[in-house]
Image (cartoon, rainbow, N blue to C red):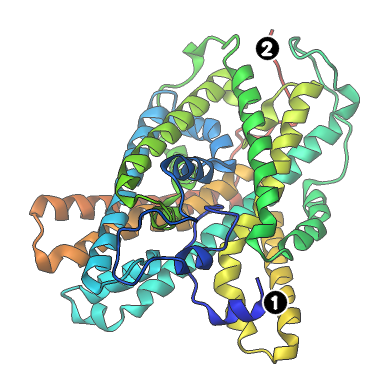
Amino acid sequence: MSTQRLRNEDYHDYSSTDVSPEESPSEGFNNLSSPGSYQRFGQSNSTTWFQTLIHLLKGNIGTGLLGLPLAVKNAGIVMGPISLLVIGIVAVHCMGILVKCAHHFCRRLNKSFVDYGDTVMYGLESSPCSWLRNHAHWGRHVVDFFLIVTQLGFCCVYFVFLADNFKQVIEAANGTTNNCHNNETVILTPTMDSRLYMLSFLPFLVLLVFIRNLRALSVFSLLANITMLVSLIMIYQFIVQRIPDPSHLPLVAPWKTYPLFFGTAIFAFEGIGMVLPLENKMKDPRKFPLILYLGMVIVTILYISLGCLGYLQFGANIQGSITLNLPNCWLYQSVKLLYSIGIFFTYALQFYVPAEIIIPFFVSRAPEHCELVVDLFVRTVLVCLTCILAILIPRLDLVISLVGSVSSSALALIIPPLLEVTTFYSEGMSPLTIFKDALISVLGFVGFVVGTYEALYELIQPSNAPIFINSTRAFI
């Protein structure tokens, strides 16, 4: 993708992951049928229902999934899965609200596609409040802001994840065996601090984000998907074996840790940014609601099963990522490395969204002969910023919870219900629907405030709970 193209094209809401790595978002959106023809059938570059389902699944599976066993610990072995189910239902409902509002404005404005930011802007323009109508353009800015925070937050999580997993593999290398079935006391060989590992990854990630074309990243996306799938299969294969007696695990955790659960859970379920681009690229968009609900049912089952089984298997020793609890044998050490490789290459795909929003602002103000230099410089600064933030908050569980509470809750829970009210209020809404939307937004806002406070409080005054233990364990 040329710098000039970045300068001239409008940003289109993409997703929290690689919706279609073989082409850029603008390419997918510009290849639509004539304006006003909302239903799009039989385009050569459109996706089938199965391809859309695969994109939806891989867009919701990342580091957030691996942090759910610790999230279940923070909620309790009964309260955790129940809460995950409720959050999943609400999150999917909010996705449906966004699609419904987008369809409404496509029909009313005779447009073939509107993204998340456009939908919020048009929703404010439809509001009965004159102040909101006059400031409707801020709706796009708010969505762009939270997209930037969310995506750069994901990138911060990736730095911490890579550092923690590589540090553990290297420190345990001397004691790593081929026996994955016996309990062993592993004497770690101290190496450098995890922050230095983050700095070690920094130059490689900078070089990775210099690849500015999603077509070129498609190979890395395929590699990431394969490595992460193999790793997940191996993780499930281990945690379902010889589960210890769960009677000592609390059914409901102390209320003080529940906000950390909320942040991690909503971080995992924050895939709302990919919904409209996926629907837009389908050959038959009328099938998208069914694909959305089917895909999110699979995702929710995956989240609940891994969260519960991981907590049951490792108990109070569960760490910020379940990979850090895997046994000290070469098979499961390779699982950590495989998943880390997948996360490494996914970094560039997560980075693409904030880059598409931020870089054109600076490039458009630079002399033409300096455009490439400015583009690469801004990319370098943004990667360094995510590294610095990861160094300042080196605890993986708190980074995930903080990002989820601050930005994911806004995009996934707070904005969509308010959007439905502003969009349809003047056309008539039942009091029950208004109450439902208000309740979801209020609960999302409470989670936003309390989750952010608890994550920041834990950073400033960490508890004595042994969340991070630099050892691995296996069960006979």
Q: Which residue is mark 1?
A: 375
Q: Amino acid at mark 1?
A: Asp
**Quadrant (top left, top right, bottom left, bottom right) of the N terminus:** bottom right
Residue 129 horizontal side relative to residue 235, left or right: left
Q: Nearer the viewer, residue 42 or 376?
A: 42
Q: Residue at x 19, y 49 (%)?
A: 436
Q: Which residue is outermost to the bottom?
A: 367
Is 146 situated left or right of 182 in this image? left
Give the camera-side residue of 351 and 382: 351
Q: Is residue 356 left or right of residue 97?
A: right
**Disc on the earlier residue, 2 or 1:** 1
Q: Quadrant of residue 136?
A: bottom left
Q: CA distance from mark 2 to mark 1?
A: 51 Å
Residue positioned 61% across, 37% down in the render: 320
**Which residue does the numbered mark 2 point to in the structure image?**
475
Q: Is residue 139 left or right of residue 348?
A: left
Could you tell me which secondary element the residue under label 2 belongs to? Answer: loop
Q: What amino acid does circle 2 point to?
A: Phe
Q: Is residue 275 shown above or below 211? A: above
What percent of the width, then of the height, locates residue 35? 33, 72
x, y percentage for residue 305? Answer: 48, 25
